[in-house]
Image (cartoon, rainbow, N blue to C red):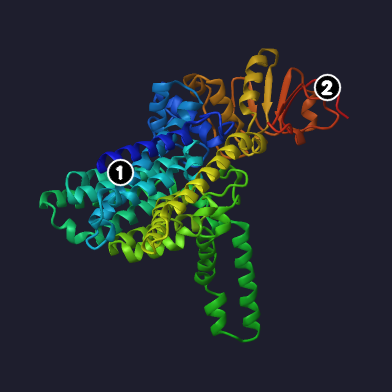
């Protein structure tokens, strides 16, 4: 009866996860962003021709928007398009699907961690209690805004998070029950490193921590299985190190580095001024130690970025990039805040020491890659924090539950209030997400590119040239995607010259992608497409596209008109 209850509860949790990730899917968010469109068209191109938009055959790295995307999500999208057809659903489906699977995998991960604890209190209780924290951890992830939002868009990090969670789960069960799963664990961690760049730090470190913490148990495994595991881990590690150091992935790292930002350069310049000032005063030791030493300055910049990701403003309020948040809803529900410190206490006091160390190290390691990048805090780069956060929060809830039970205070009152708060906050989140994101944040989701493409394809026969401004942020990839432009024909016409933002050289068919000036409007049989601010007030647009809140998004005007 107890096992049956657990199965039913887990099934209900998965249904909740499916609802939050597939309700109004894929129409909310209201449009694809540039990365999603790039995944979609490159996957379509690979499916039809075996080559990406640059003409490279079955690439390991997709040059794409000059950010060299990792291959796992791209090839999952190839399969999704092959099954569901070429549409927005197919592009976003892998993320939503693996988001649900992550909820399931988290249950078995926490269950495996609990089962390995020799002195954990929860192991001495009934089957339901033995699985209560795994169930609650899974449930909290199912309703977590942070995880839901990235499950509903084509987020490569979301798929990578599944493989990290699965890799840790397979390690625990392989070590205790089926040693053959250890090889699959290495493979899963490896797939995570080829899913998202930040996980090239997180996945190997989590795998190493698991190996060190459970080495005594691991040594009990059959020697042949243990040798295979070590060899496989070493093989993948060697490939990963070489690949990261010598392949084009370093371009993406350099492009997002915090040390290349103007803010960092200003700090270094200020330190240089202080160094010269100390030198004039003849103060040598402090000058060399504090000002003529980039280590201190760099560490200060990195640590600031690191700790920003633990800020309540970042975690519980609508703070960073608008694509990463729902209006007036944080990445985590505000009611989770008091349960996190309680969960840390309960985790350390009531759980196995190794379990506590692993969960705490996980949450401490997760922000490290993001701390050296610009534009922080950044929700998607630290998506790995969601797993330990939900485990800790679940422990916090049961810390309160056990305290009330020990004090013989009616637990059902707490559970009733807790359930009501969850229902109310979840309803508010769905309301804000489904109704307000399309209306308030269609601009952040670059709405209008589909409507622009449909209009241009319908009317292009009336013009010799169509000039689309590069200020529209990678307009070429949106037009290729939404027009379903034949990849083979696109390749014959030269393919993509560069996917960089503001690229001025891309052309295909009668379309040119570059900025235009007022003088260009004198040219006959030419159509100009751009942001409203790029057009003179004297020019009356032929066609206007508005964001969903009614503000102007894109203007389309024809040439051969008089200009002042």
Q: Residues within 10 Å of mark 1 (few under 14, many from 20)?
A: many
- Residue 216 sits in which quadrant? bottom left
Q: Determine whether 513 is above or below 460 in the image.
A: below
Residues under labels 2 and 1: Cα distance? 60 Å
Pick the quarter of the image with the N terminus.
Answer: top left
Q: Is residue 560 left or right of residue 208?
A: right
Whether residue 499 is visible: yes
Locate residue 226, reporting x and y percent. 15, 52
SS at badge 2 = loop
For the image shown, how many numbered marks are present on the structure?
Answer: 2
Locate residue 471, reporting x and y percent. 67, 36
SS at badge 1 = helix
- Residue 461 sits in which quadrant? top right
Pick the quarter of the image with the C terminus.
Answer: top right
- Residue 191 sits in which quadrant? top left
* Residue occupied by mark 1: 188
Counting residues from the start of the chain, the first of labels 2 and 1 encountered is 1
* Residue occupied by mark 2: 561
Q: Determine whether 224 is above or below 311 in the image.
A: above
Whether residue 53 is visible: no
Q: What residue is shown at x 77% (from left), y 21% (from top)?
A: 542
């Amino acid at each position: 009866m107890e096992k049956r209850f657990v199965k039913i509860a887990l099934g209900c949790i998965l249904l909740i996860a499916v609802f939050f990730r597939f309700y109004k899917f894929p129409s909310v968010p209201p449009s694809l962003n540039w990365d999603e469109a790039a995944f979609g068209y490159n996957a379509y191109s690979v499916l039809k021709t075996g080559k990406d938009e640059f003409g490279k055959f079955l690439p390991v790295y997709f040059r794409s928007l000059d950010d060299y995307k990792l291959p796992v999500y791209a090839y999952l999208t190839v399969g999704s398009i092959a099954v569901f057809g070429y549409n927005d659903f197919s592009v976003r489906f892998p993320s939503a699907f693996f988001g649900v699977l992550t909820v399931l995998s988290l249950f078995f991960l926490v269950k495996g961690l609990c089962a390995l604890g020799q002195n954990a209190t929860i192991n001495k209780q009934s089957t339901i209690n033995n699985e209560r924290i795994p169930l609650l951890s899974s449930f909290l992830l199912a309703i977590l805004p942070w995880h839901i939002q990235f499950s509903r868009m084509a987020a490569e990090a979301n798929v990578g998070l599944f493989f990290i969670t699965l890799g840790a789960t397979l390690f625990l069960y392989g070590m205790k029950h089926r040693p053959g799963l250890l090889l699959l664990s290495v493979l899963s961690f490896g797939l995570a490193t080829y899913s998202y760049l930040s996980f090239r730090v997180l996945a190997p470190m989590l795998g190493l921590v698991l190996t060190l913490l459970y080495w005594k148990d691991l040594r009990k495994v059959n020697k042949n299985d243990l040798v295979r595991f070590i060899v496989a881990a070493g093989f993948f590690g060697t490939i990963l190190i070489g690949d990261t150091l010598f392949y084009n992935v370093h371009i993406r790292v350099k492009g997002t580095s915090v040390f290349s930002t103007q803010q960092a350069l200003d700090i270094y310049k200020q330190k240089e001024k202080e160094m010269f000032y100390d030198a004039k005063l003849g103060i040598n030791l402090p000058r060399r130690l504090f000002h003529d030493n980039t280590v201190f300055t760099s560490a200060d910049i990195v640590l600031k970025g690191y700790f920003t990701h633990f800020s309540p403003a970042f975690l519980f309020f609508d703070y960073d990039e608008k694509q990463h948040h729902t209006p007036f809803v944080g990445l985590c529900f505000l009611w989770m805040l008091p349960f996190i410190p309680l969960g840390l206490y309960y985790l350390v006091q009531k759980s196995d020491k190794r379990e506590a160390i692993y969960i705490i190290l996980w949450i401490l390691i997760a922000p490290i890659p993001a701390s050296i990048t610009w534009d922080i805090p950044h929700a998607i780069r630290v998506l790995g924090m969601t797993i330990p956060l939900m485990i800790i929060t679940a422990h916090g809830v049961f810390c309160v539950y056990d305290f009330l039970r020990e004090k013989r205070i009616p637990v059902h009152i707490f559970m009733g209030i807790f359930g009501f708060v969850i229902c109310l906050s979840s309803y508010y989140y769905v309301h804000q997400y489904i109704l307000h994101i399309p209306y308030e944040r269609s601009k952040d989701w670059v709405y209008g590119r589909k409507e622009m493409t449909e209009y241009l394809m319908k009317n292009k026969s009336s013009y010799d040239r169509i000039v689309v401004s590069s200020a529209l942020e990678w307009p070429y990839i949106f037009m290729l995607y939404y027009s379903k432009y034949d990849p083979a024909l696109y390749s014959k016409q030269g393919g993509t010259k560069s996917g960089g933002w503001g690229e001025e050289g891309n052309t295909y068919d009668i379309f040119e992608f570059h900025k235009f000036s007022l003088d260009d409007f004198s040219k006959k049989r030419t159509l100009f497409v751009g942001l409203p601010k790029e057009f003179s007030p004297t020019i009356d647009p032929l066609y206007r596209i508005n964001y969903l809140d009614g503000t102007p998004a894109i203007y389309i005007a024809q040439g051969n008109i008089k200009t002042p």
